[in-house]
Structures are given as structure tokens and as C-alpha cells.
Image (cartoon, rainbow, N blue to C red):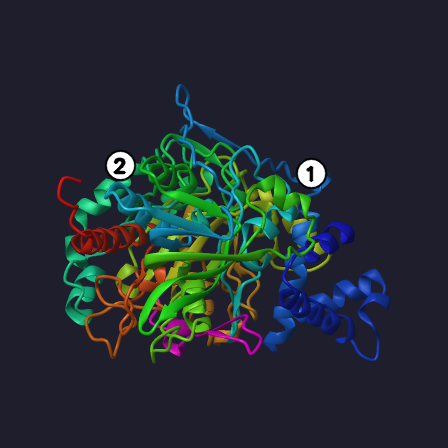
Amino acid sequence: MAEPVARFLSRLPERTVRVVRLGLRAIEWAPFPWRFSRLSCDARSAYLARMESSRFFVYRDLLLLAKILCMFGWARDERVRSTVGYEARCGVADGEAPPQPGPLGELRPQGDGEECDVAIVGSGAGGAAAAATLAEAGLDVLVLESGPHFDHRSYPEDPLEAIPVLYRDGGMTVAGGRPAIPVPVGRALGGTTVINSGTCFRAPDEVLAEWQERYGVEWAPELEPTFAAAEHELAVTRLDPERMGRNGQLCMEGAEALGASGGPIARNAGACIQCSSCPVGCRLDAKRAMHVSYLPRAAAAGARIRTGVQALRLLREGERVTGIACRGGLPTTAKEEFSRNGRPVRGRPFEVRARAVLLAAGAFGTPELLLRSGIRHPHLGRHLHVHPAAWIGGRYEQEVRGWEGVMQSYYVDEWQPQRILLEATFTPLSFGAQWLPGAGREHSERIRDYDKLGSIGVHLHDHSSGYVGLHPDGSLRLSYKLRDEEVRLLQFGIARAAEVHFAAGAVEVYPNVGPVPVIKRGSLPEFESMRVRADDLRLEAFHPMSTARMGADPKQSVTAPDGSVHGTDGLYVADASLLPSSVGVNPMMTIIACATQVATQLAQRISARAPAPSPGG
């Protein structure tokens, strides 16, 4: 196990590796005056168990780091998978075929630079939708993506190979705070849509109304046709309860027993009925991520797509942005990415000149680039929302085999008025085993029963917020402060997920709350009455947003409702950072709808400024 994990770490950014080394060194010396590595196996297991039950959150965080690294390596072993019975695969309904996307064109950047009408930084939900809209309006569009292109022919099956190449920071992008919250985001052509679960919700009406009334985004309540068009483009289909898998069915049965409202999730995967590889790319590309949907459509309309191009800073003439200084020559394809074997790539200067620049690098990448380019605003990088989420496992007497079926399959919205959304989400073994309680043999025994595990994600519609900034060396710095009242809300949500599990027949529940590794049947009231602190929670998040929020008031928002950056000409934003507040549901469809709106207005503006044709021309 150690060798593949060491190889994995060698492919991560140096700052990430330093943090991991510091954590592992802390574990080594934590039993001072003894060293952890020199303890007997039983003594090590006992010490890890004391770390897990400690009231000092740093010990629990260190243990979680160790479990994450160990599970990346151990859970990939075929002997472990065979013992559990785990198998990752994808499938579509009989008689159906995965989509056959059109070509993307030449992905390698040309020469020392290129020119265009609109340069788009980022190829995720926002950038891809904007590219298709602008190209189909007749504009010359250039899409820049720092990551390489992967598809069903090249996704690595081994998680230790996949994570460093498909995720920013090797999946270890973390918002500091109490608790620290991992926020993994994609780094490939298609952005995070390549590695997300494919869940499709429209923004709730009350959220869109708030954007209109509080932030002056007048078009927000008028997105219904845009949502409908995006759903058609992505073959968004609601899951069949009979075929969504036992994990979703148990969540449905538990919710129905409680009288709690919910339903099968709609996904951008057409006739997909089996998926257990979403976090490392759909093996059939049945999930309509951007590289098999909007980007081929943009290319068909004439857009140029370039991978392996990192945007370094914006080029400006006075208050107008005129282009982007980039680093080209990075891996453009999966083959090139793997051939470097973790070795750094020097790259080469590459410059883009454009009539307009549209940033769609995500809620981390967009403020990062703006700050690095010297653009300042009191609200830039602030108001980071992430939908903090807790993984709540339930052990059942019967087999669940949650990997058979759809990874994210059923939602419970009964408690949305309390800003809590539950989603039945069965995480692949390498990503889910670390959330099980215990250490040593106890943890191994729980993994052995992975086939009897059901899991529900608790998502908070957060009012808490964080910050995106830069370290002195220019690297990304994230922080997030969870409010005390939202700690109570998450505790409430965890209890509701446990209630659903017990109503469906679970014998015990794993709440991922430090002092309470296991909730037994009948002890839920005791859990609800205890005082839970923020650093008792083990959270993760997948939906960063609002770090360059839009609004009519330039003093309170970074961008205007048309996506333009206040105080700067020729610069626009069309990604999750644009969203004025937390959406409360998986935001992909909302990002696409808002990016389409911004791109439509931008196309009209540029076309109106185009010079009239010469006489006889």
C-alpha cells in the first residue's frame, strides 16, 4: 500500500505535499516520547482509537488524513475488493447506447498565441455553456483549459492514478477552519462536470426571487426556458425507482415510512442505470459532462478549444482587459499527462488577445485569477458558500451493495424549509471507506461489511461563508467559518438522515460526529440533545460558489447582472462565482442557465459594436 500512495503523493502540488508531510510527521510524534512507527501493531491500533475519540479536533483531523491516504491505497487492492464483493462499473438500459459526441477539433495551442472575439478561461458548466452560446451567435470563441482531455477511453480505473490528474490539488483542496472542509474540484476538459454525480436540480424559485429582489438580478425569475433547453441538451432524466439501486430504494422506503417528501433524482445521464465510477469519470460517458455535450456543440459552431493552457494573469490597457498571459505547453491529452509521470512541466509563454475575456474558472479559479491580475474589490473572494455536507452511513442486516445502481439516486426535501436536503449517495470504496468509524481491526471489519452499508448525504443550504485569497507565494488560500446556528442545523440534518436509515431498517448509524462514532437504535434522542461543536463535525463540500457575486449595486457585488466586472471593461464572469448566494441544491444547472444568460447578452453587445460592412462588401 505504501508504494502506490507514495507515488500518488509525488504527483501532487508541492504545497499540498508539504501539508501532508506535516500531518504524517505529527502522527509519528504524537505518542511522544514514543514514535508511532515503532509501536507494536496492537499499540498503534489502540493509539488510533484514542485519537478518534479525542475531544481535541486536531487528533481526529490527523486520523482522517491517515485514513484517506490509506483507503486510497488499500481499497484499490483487488484482494480487498474481492473480499467486499465491490465492483465499479457503468451501464445503460437495454437497447440504449451512450452518446456519440462530435469532435472537439485541435486541442493543442497554436504558436505563441492566438486572437479571438471572446476568450473563455475554463471549460466546466459555465465556460462550456457560454462557449456554445457565443459561437452559435457567430463570434470567434477560444476556450482555454489548464487540464488535459480525458474521455471513456482514457479515464484511469485506479483511483490513485485518477485523482492527481482529474482533480485540482490531487483532490486535497481544503477550506481551512473549524472544521477544515475538503472541497474537491475538477481539473480536466469539462471541469468538475467530469467528476460530479450528474445530479440536476433547478434553482428553487425562492432563491431566484431573492436574487431579483435583494441583488437586482431582474432576469433571475425568468430562467425557465433556459433550464428547459439545458435539460434537453443534457438528456436530463429522472431515475426509475425500480432500477436506481438498493441504496436509493432504502432511502425512499425510510422517507415514505416517516411521511417525508422526496423523489428520484434527475440526472444528465439519459438511460444510465448503473454508475459507480462518477468521481473518476463515467466509463461510458453516458453522463453528459461538458466535454461530451456543450463543448462539441461549441466546436461544431466554430469555437476553438485548447487544453494544457494555464491562465496566469489578465492583460490590461487602462481599465480595459485586452487578453490573457498564459503558460502553454502543458499536457493536452491523457496520454501526455501520464507520460510525464508526475514530473513538472516547464511550459512556454502563450498570449491570447481578445475583444472580451470571460472567466469561467470556477469559484476558486476566477477570484484567484482576478486577484493575481491586480483587480481589487471589497467583495472579491468573499461570500464563499460550499453547501457543507456530512456522509451518514447506516449498517443493515441485509445486503445493500450500493455500488449496484446509481451513485446519487434519491432526494428527501421534507426539511428544506430548515435548509437541509438529503441525497442518497453511495460513495465508491476508495472515497467512502474513510468515513466509517473505527481504527485498525474495528475499521477493517466495518469495511468487510461494506456490502451492507447504505449512505445518505446531508447538505446544508449555508448562510455561513468563507474566503478565497492568495498566499504570499501566489498560491490559493481558502477559509470557511461555520456559524454556530448552522452547526445546530447540521446536527438536525444528521439526525434526520439517521431517522431515515432507522425507518428503513438500519441497525446502527455512523453520524461522523467526533464524540459519537455510532448511533444505536433507540439512542437518537440522546444524540439530538447533546451539544455538538463545529470541530466535532466531519464535513466535505462539492459546490463552491458566490466569490465574485453579481448584483446591481457595484459597492456590494463584484459583477453586474450582465456578468461584467464592475469598474473594468471587456471582462465578464460566467461560472459559480457569479451566483449571488447559496443555491441550496446541486448548482450545475443553475450555473449553465446563468452562463447562458450572460453569454447571450455579451453576444448581443459585441455584435452591436461590430463595424458595419464596407460598401459592396
Q: Are marks 1 and 2 in contact (CB under 8 Å)?
A: no
| Residue 596 visible in the displayed image | yes
On the image, the x and y values in percent for residue 577 come to 35, 63
Reply above or below: 513 against 436.
below
Q: Residue at x 41, y 24 (%)?
A: 97
Secondary element type, mark 2: helix
Among the 4 quarters of the image, the one containing residue 230:
top left
482 is within the stretch colored magenta: yes
Q: Residue at x 20, y 65 (%)?
A: 211
Reply above or below: 474 against 433.
below
On the image, the x and y values in percent for residue 616 come to 14, 39
On the image, the x and y values in percent for residue 513 come to 52, 67
| Residue 525 visible in the displayed image | no
Q: Which residues are magenta?
A: 462-488
The residue under label 2 is which amino acid type?
His
Nearest the viewer among 559 and 65 is 559
| Mark 1 or mark 2, earlier in chain | 1
Q: Which residue is mark 1?
A: 83
Of tags 1 and 2, which is closer to the observer? 2
On the image, the x and y values in percent for residue 78 come to 70, 38
Left or right: 561, with 330 as reference point: left
Residue occupying the far top of the picture = 95
Secondary element type, mark 1: helix
Nearest the viewer among 155 and 446 is 155
Q: Residue at x 41, y 40 (%)?
A: 249
15 is within the stretch colored magenta: no
Nearest the viewer among 282 and 68 is 282
Q: CA distance from mark 1 to mark 2?
A: 42 Å
Q: Which residue is mark 2?
A: 232
Left or right: 323, with 514 as reference point: left
